[in-house]
Image: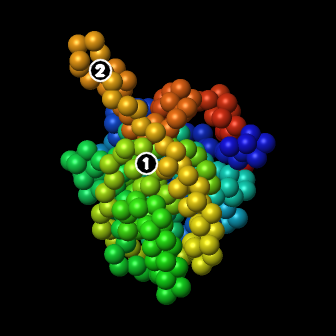
Amino acid sequence: MNPSTAPTMACPRHTSSDDDSLNGGISVLIPGRDERDNLPRLVAEVHAALAGKRYEIIVIDDGSSDDSWRWLKGAALEDPRLRPFHHDTSFGQSTSVWQAARLARGEWLATLDGDGQNDPADLPDMLSLASLEGLDLVAGHRTERRDDAIKRVSSRLANAIRQSLLHDDTPDTGCGIKVIRREVFLRLPYFDHMHRFLPALVRAQGGQVQSLPVRHRERVAGVSKYGFFDRLWVGISDIVGVMWLVRRSQLPSPLQNTSGHAASEALGPVRGIMPGNAEDLADAEAAAPTETDMAADGLTLHQSGAN
């Protein structure tokens, strides 16, 4: 990301009662723009779905012009699990998710769209599947879409094109609810719209991916930020770039020591290692980056004060 165009993020000042590492817990990442009327219900549903687990909720308010940021700041004062951040202007869903992942403290990342159409009640099953099967990513599959005809057709066509070109074996890569290991996500290459291609990117690096049928709900407030061309034609140029990345991705070759034993333990996890990225991402894997860490990546993080 170019530092000259990097988003400025604000966060409310509050103290969390949870351990900073979350001890292998879950970080729920919710990007949203102008979703004031959907956020209270969505946050409450996350609390209900993950009751008894160690988790946090990171909401990125992506340049909203409604009352989203005011509500988030007030809610965070009463909710130590809620960690909201704010862009002054919109930088898009992928940038918001990417930043939230770097701020996250959990071992697992769970993504939800801010429009409330994803049901957080699906998260426990997705997390259980990932854990039991040793998966790196579980992608939601909206088997019964609750959208208008134009959105259903454009999404179905876009998914078909992606599948035919990328062979990611994921029927609904555009579904907003996903569960992914944080260490795997942080090793993926960043680019705008990357959130549409997470299954293909993870598979290209040797990661294990499965899809799971999930619920889908009608939008009850606000308006969609994506139109027909956003789902289809804009994504075609991205597909070409992802095809190039997939073809050029190289996994570490198996190594043996002088005794003939595999040396993979010494190398650590091989999930998601992009050529030339491992050294740069060592700091990114540390939990809860500081203000200095974020500034080094071209991001400015400041306390909200009177914002």
Kind of element beneath mark 2? loop
Above or below 31: residue 304: above
Is residue 52 at least partly visible in the picture? no
Q: What scheme was used to colour the molecule?
A: rainbow
Q: Position of residue 198 (x, y in %)?
A: 46, 54
The residue at the point 35 percent across, 79 percent down is 144
User: In the orientation shown, which residue stands out farthest toward the right?
Assistant: 4
Indicate the amino acid at tag 1: Ala
Res 284 label: none
Which residue in the rendered view is the most extreme toward the bottom?
149
Residue most extreme to the top = 258
Q: Does 258 sit left or right of 94 as displayed?
A: left
Q: Residues within 10 Å of mark 1 (few under 14, many from 20)?
A: many
- Give whichever of discs 2 and 1 has the lower sequence position: 1
The answer to which of 118 and 140 lies nearer the viewer is 140
Which residue corresponds to the image point at 76% horizontal and 47% vertical from the top-left? Answer: 5
Dot 2: within a 10 Å radius of its alpha carbon, few (fewer than 14), some, or many (20 or more) residues? few
The Cα–Cα distance between marks 2 and 1, rounded to whole angstroms, is 24 Å
**Residue at 64% across / 51% down in the picture?**
86
Secondary structure type for disc 1: helix
- Checking the image for residue 204, the label placed there is 1
Residue 107 image-quadrant placement: top left
Q: Which residue is mark 2?
A: 256
Q: Is 196 situated above or below 245?
A: below
Mark 2 or 1, closer to the camera: 2
Q: Amino acid at mark 2?
A: Gln
Q: Position of residue 39 (x, y in %)?
A: 51, 63
Q: In the rendered image, which quarter contains the N terminus?
A: top right
Quarter-of-image position of residue 260: top left
In the depicted structure, whether residue 226 falls above or below residue 304: below
